[in-house]
Image (cartoon, rainbow, N blue to C red):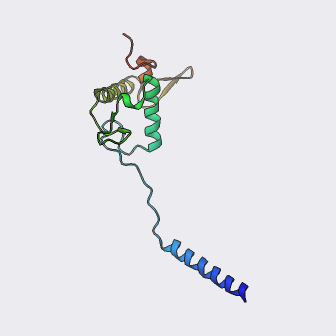
Amino acid sequence: MLRKRTAIVLSLLATVITITSATMPEKAEEKPEYKNLKVLPKNISHEELDKVMKHYNNALGVRCNFCHAPNKNGEKGLDFASDEKEEKTIARNMMKMTNKLNQKYFGTEKKVHNQAVMEVSCNTCHRGKAHPEG
């Protein structure tokens, strides 16, 4: 008798769970909503944005706070949307410049010569330093 009750309760529970999960709306794929992107594409993925920013960190030998201002509301962290720091404006101008140079001299497709990608990047001038040597 106890086994029969347990089986009935378990089957009712399984039915409720199945019906509940079948009627719940599927979660839409969440895309990050970045604020104040002016050069990078507005629909850039989180992974691609991280990749770009890590490239800048390495090419200039800096950390995120070099271009990004701290939060003003007292919270820890950085205000990535803020344009407070001049370095962020300079970085955007440099991005535009390298994009134009690469478009003009190397075309839209990356060209490879002797296994080296032929393009201008931050590292071309900065070589791991925040300010390129003259």
The residue at 35%/42% (across/down) is 75
Picture coordinates of residue 47 (x, y %)?
A: 47, 42
Relative side of 128 to 68, left or right: right
Residue 21 drawn above or below residue 132: below
Using the rendered view, name the quadrant where residue 60 is placed. Answer: top left
Relative side of 84 to 47, left or right: left
Picture coordinates of residue 64 (x, y %)?
A: 40, 32
Looking at the picture, tell me which residue is in the foreground, 119 or 128. Answer: 128
Relative side of 41 to 50, left or right: left
Give the quadrant of the C terminus: top left
The residue at 44%/60% (across/down) is 28
Which residue is situated farthest in the bottom direction here? 1
Give the quadrant of the N terminus: bottom right
Picture coordinates of residue 54 (x, y %)?
A: 46, 32
Residue 70 drawn above or below residue 101: below
Tell me if I can see residue 39 in this picture: yes
Using the rendered view, name the quadrant where residue 6 is placed. Answer: bottom right
The residue at 44%/34% (across/down) is 52
Which residue is situated farthest in the top direction here? 134
Q: How many marks?
A: 0
Picture coordinates of residue 109 (x, y %)?
A: 45, 31
Tell me if I can see residue 120 in this picture: no
